[in-house]
Amino acid sequence: MANYNKVMLMGNLTRDPQLSYTPNQTAVVDFGLAVNRKWKGQDGSQRDETCFVDCTAFGRQAETINKYLSKGRPVFVEGRLTFDSWTGQDGTKRNKLKVTVENFQFLPDGGGSGRGQQGPDAGGSQAPPQGGEGEDDIPF
């Protein structure tokens, strides 16, 4: 039986990214993503639903996300679902699914084209347009 694990999400950061390093000095960043869905109900009323997703990125992508993204900023992420399991402080077994980011792209913040946006702490330097594949590699 074939297996496939691919996630594509577009949303806004729910909190500032939190950067840390593994013992072998690999960068790790954790951030939350809010993905909104709007639809019209059977009664014609506008409905909203928000899905909150925890995400983790590693290496250079982690450092770039930490440098240029902050709470409220939009981002597109591609990755895979990862299952985390741990024992809580009260001794109960806990688990959750999260997304391990394999690729991402910065998105326009509503008021610009997205290219050349300034990061929140970039000090006047321009944020790279995306993290991962080049713009010419996108099939659409």
Image (spheres, rainbow, N blue to C red):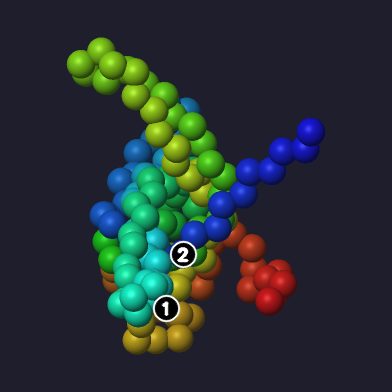
Circle 1: element type: loop
Q: Position of residue 128 (x, y in %)?
A: 49, 70
Would you say 106 lies left or right of 125 here? right
Q: Identify which residue, 50 or 27, lies in the foreground.
A: 50
Q: Residue at x 57, y 45 (%)?
A: 80
Q: Pick the residue in front: 59 or 49.
A: 49
Q: Give the residue drawn at x 44%, y 57%.
A: 64
Q: To which quarter of the image does residue 94 belong?
A: top left
Q: Which residue is mark 1?
A: 108
In front: mark 2 or mark 1? Answer: 2
Q: Is residue 34 above or below residue 29?
A: below
Q: Please identify the quadrant where the N terminus is shown.
A: top right
Disc 2: which residue: 10
The C terminus, quarter of image: bottom right
What residue do we see at 64% from left, 63% from top?
133
Q: Residue furthest top?
A: 91
Q: Is residue 64 visible in this depiction of the protein? A: yes
In percent of width and height, residue 60 lies at 50, 50
> Is there any visible trace of residue 59 in the rendered image?
no
Binning the other alpha carbons within 10 Å of mark 2 as few (below 14), some (14 to 19) or many (20 upward) gives some
